[in-house]
């Protein structure tokens, strides 16, 4: 059986995932599940607050490819196929400049590419996540079809479960994709909605 996504033009498929990504960014965890303490802001050596696209290009070189979508001309997705990991970067350009909006990494890299700023690595266990970030999180089943490849810029969709940490202070969101043994196979870090300053 063929995937419906394979029959659609690439722009339509990517557009749907950018919409999905925006919806995921807008979701808010219940107050009793919001993580406390300092939020995670770094993944793959990229800090959502301070790293610029030019810094990422210096770190990883030119991307393997980049993509845009017709319904959101200010957004560009960048993809790097690295030796032990795949890295995806969402970037938004508006009148005030360029902002990295999210970082996604999957694979087996346990170095900089596959690590958060607080030291969580691809391959570690959900208990390692809790040790670093606390036990206020949401764990949910993914319901992915294992026979179909993950679509780029769709977040953590090719996993058994995902563990979602969202911080009370600024709502940075870190999602870890988990395999059947609760080991991390993917990490996705998202900038808060309407960052900085909120949605006033």
Image: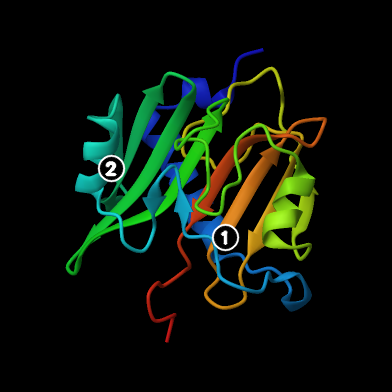
Badge 2 is on which residue?
Answer: 56
State which quarter of the image contains the C terminus: bottom left
36 vs 6, left or right, is: right
Quadrant of residue 195 within the rendered picture: bottom left
Q: In the displayed structure, does residue 75 sit left or right of residue 97?
A: right
User: How far from the left and from the top, in percent, is residue 146?
Assistant: 71, 22
Q: Earlier in the sequence, mark 2 or mark 1?
A: 2
Against 45, residue 186 (above or below) is: above
Disc number lying in front (2 or 1): 2
**Circle number at residue 5:** none
Label 1 Cα crowd, 10 Å radius (few <14 / some 14-19 / many 20+): many
Q: Which residue is mark 1?
A: 173
Coordinates of residue 56 in the picture (x, y in percent): 28, 42
> Residue 3 placed where, x, y %?
59, 21
State the CA–CA distance, disc 2 to disc 1.
20 Å
Residue 180: x and y, percent?
81, 30
135 up-or-down from 155: above or below: below
The N terminus, quarter of image:
top right
Q: Residue at x 53, y 60 (%)?
A: 40
Q: Circle 2 — which element?
A: helix
Query: Depth check: 96 or 114 in front?
Result: 114
Name the residue: 79% across, 47% down.
127
Residue 93 found in image quarter: bottom left
**Badge 2: few (under 14), some or many (20 or more) residues near its Cα, within 10 Å?**
some
């Amino acid at each position: 059986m063929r995937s419906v996504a394979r029959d659609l033009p690439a722009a339509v498929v990517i557009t749907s995932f950018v919409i999905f990504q925006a919806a995921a960014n807008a979701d808010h965890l219940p107050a009793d599940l919001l993580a406390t303490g300092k939020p995670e802001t770094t993944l793959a050596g990229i800090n959502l607050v301070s790293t610029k696209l030019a810094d990422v290009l210096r770190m990883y070189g030119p991307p393997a490819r980049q993509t845009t979508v017709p319904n959101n001309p200010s957004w560009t997705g960048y993809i790097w196929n690295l030796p032990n990991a795949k890295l995806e970067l969402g970037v938004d350009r508006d009148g005030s400049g360029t902002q990295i909006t999210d970082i996604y990494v999957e694979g087996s890299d346990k170095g900089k590419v596959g690590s958060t700023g607080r030291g969580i690595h691809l391959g570690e266990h959900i208990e390692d996540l809790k040790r670093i970030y606390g036990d206020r999180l949401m764990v949910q089943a993914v319901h992915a079809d294992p026979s179909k490849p993950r679509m780029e810029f769709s977040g953590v969709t090719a996993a058994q479960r995902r563990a979602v940490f969202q911080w009370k202070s600024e709502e940075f969101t870190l999602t870890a994709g988990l395999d059947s043994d609760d080991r991390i196979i993917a990490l996705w870090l998202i900038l808060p909605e309407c960052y900085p300053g909120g949605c006033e």
